[in-house]
Image: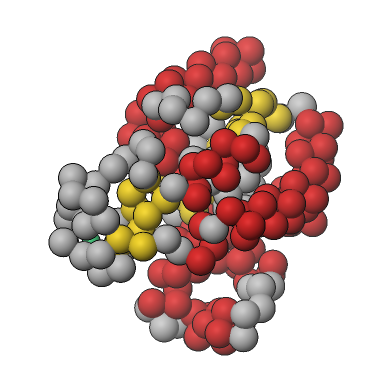
């Protein structure tokens, strides 16, 4: 099953995708990770990407598409994959359409209210980057990292007013994208209405959607 996960920042895409990847034995392909790896290995492309991000500019679509084409050609993607972080616009979806078939698009529906509560309670370790949550994933000692003893802090982009702005941008950009996949009859919605819903419950919901799509198409 070749899948795309859509959802606002803080919807839990990464968490659900990495759990499903273990169950379904298909890779979780995050364009964010691919880009970071490319920068780290200092390839020519990686250095070009670094220049864009140093200037605070978006990495052009054609670079992401080149990296993604390379990644999707690896043998482990043949049986399927979960794509996360791409596409974000209708234009990107059309480009993706040219390099891979897509079987299913999972749209994670999470209200702004829940996202803001979740992200504004997020704490990050200054030293090792481990993420905690004041409501759902508390550290053993207040404001101290379980892993390394580092100090926990709130990232600038996890502040409520910044989150609201990110959500507005997301909704505006992805609306046409959601419509694009709905028209192709590939879109399935999975909702999370409660902040305290454990990830396993949502993963199970997604799994049921995947199973039913697989059945209806076989
Ligand atoms: Zn730490």
Image location (x, y in percent) of residue 8: 62, 45
**Residue 74 in the figure: left or right of residue 160:** left
Q: Vertical placement of 96 versus 179: above or below?
A: below
Image location (x, y in percent) of residue 109: 64, 32
Q: Residue at x 42, y 61 (%)?
A: 154
Q: State which image quarter holds ligand 1.
A: bottom left
Depth check: 3 or 143 in front?
A: 143
Quarter of the view holding residue 212: top right
Image location (x, y in percent) of residue 5: 58, 40
Q: Vertical placement of 95 versus 133: above or below?
A: below
Visible in this render: residue 39? yes
Image location (x, y in percent) of residue 149: 16, 61
**Residue 122 in the figure: left or right of residue 83:** left
Depth check: 183 or 142 in front?
A: 142
Q: Residue at x 38, y 38 (%)?
A: 135
**Residue 191 in the figure: left or right of residue 201:** right
Depth check: 166 or 83 in front?
A: 166
Q: Residue at x 83, y 32 (%)?
A: 183
């Amino acid at each position: 099953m070749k899948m795309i996960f859509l959802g606002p920042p803080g919807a839990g895409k990464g968490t659900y995708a990495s759990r499903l990847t273990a169950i379904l034995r298909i890779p979780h392909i995050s364009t964010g990770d691919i880009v970071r790896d490319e920068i780290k290995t200092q390839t020519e492309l990686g250095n070009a990407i670094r220049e864009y991000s140093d200037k605070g500019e978006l990495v052009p679509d054609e670079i992401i598409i080149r990296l993604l084409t390379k990644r999707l050609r690896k043998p482990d993607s043949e049986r399927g994959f979960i794509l996360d972080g791409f596409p974000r616009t209708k234009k990107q979806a059309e480009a993706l359409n040219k390099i891979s078939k897509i079987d299913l698009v999972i749209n994670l529906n999470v209200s702004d209210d829940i996202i803001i509560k979740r992200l504004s309670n997020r704490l990050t370790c200054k030293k090792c980057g481990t993420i905690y949550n004041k409501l759902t994933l508390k550290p053993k000692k207040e404001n101290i990292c379980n892993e390394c003893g580092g100090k926990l802090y709130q990232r600038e982009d996890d502040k409520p007013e910044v989150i609201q702005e990110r959500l507005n941008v997301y909704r505006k950009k992805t609306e046409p994208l959601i419509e694009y996949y709905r028209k192709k009859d590939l879109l399935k919605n999975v909702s999370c209405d409660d902040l305290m819903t454990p990830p396993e419950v949502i993963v199970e919901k997604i799994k049921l959607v995947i199973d039913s799509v697989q059945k209806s198409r076989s």
